[in-house]
Image (cartoon, rainbow, N blue to C red):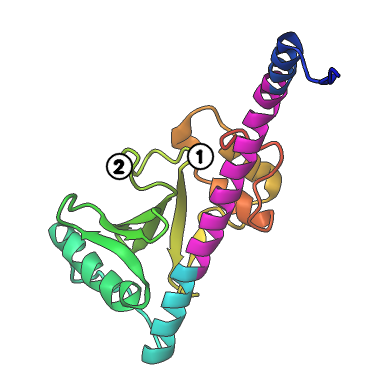
Amino acid sequence: MYRKYIAFTLAEVLITLGIIGVVAAMTLPAVVGKYRRLVAETKLKKFYSVINQSLARSLAEKGDIEIDTSDVSDDANAEFLEEWCRENMVKYIVKLKEEGIEKNPNYYKIVFMDGSGAAIYLNNAAMYVFYQLNFNKPSITKTNMDGANEFLFLYDREEHRVEPIFKDWNVSSLKNNCYATGDSQRHGCAALIQKNNWEIPDDYPWIR
């Protein structure tokens, strides 16, 4: 008695694998892009929440938070900023690492547990917060907000909150700013994402 075995031929197996490979090559970029956007949205929303919760706790304890630089010379801005951040924000945040001002006296830097980080810069009475999704990428500069990894926030002295810069602009104006070709112009990207309920718009060009 002979038994008849049913199986795929080598050609059929190779054709099937080829089809799977083509489908995977077509769908993988979309899957990776969706994942990147989700990570960016999650980190931005978490940073906004954590940093403002820390300021709210500080405000509740002290009754008021001031940034008084009237007696601070330009040379001492970094030391003043470091002390202010430690006293009003950092002590309430679970962080991975604090670089302070040692590596770059122009910025006070902290790195969060998820690998993102913030570089804080004081310019006269204004305090800017440069948030970076991946702090291991090239260091933040105050003119490079690329909309893909770096986003610009500003400390609101009246509300005692950190908010995206240009938050009062309408969506059309924010898109004109954020979608600009030159990355030195994209200061409104964080505000645009915030207006979309911290979800990256479908036509957003920088995180794909």
> Where does residue 204 sit, x and y in percent of width and height?
64, 38
Name above or below for residue 84 compared with residue 126: below
> Measured along the vertical axis of the image, is residue 190 above or below residue 81?
above
Farthest residue to the front: give it.
1
The N terminus appears in which quarter of the rendering? top right
Name the dominant secondary structure of the magenta segment.
helix
* Quarter of the view holding residue 126: bottom left
Could you tell me which secondary element the residue under label 1 belongs to? loop
In the image shown, does 172 or 204 lie closer to the viewer? Answer: 204
Could you say which disc has been placed on residue 148 in the image? Answer: 1
Identify the amino acid type marked 2. Ser
Taking 154 as reference, is 65 above or below it? below
Closer to the camera, 67 or 31? 31
Q: Which dot marks residue 139?
A: 2
The picture places residue 106, in percent across and down from the top left corner, at 22, 52
Q: CA distance from mark 1 to mark 2?
A: 14 Å
Tell me where the magenta segment starts and ends, as one range: 21-49
- Position of residue 61 measured from the top left corner of the image (x, y, whole percent): 38, 90
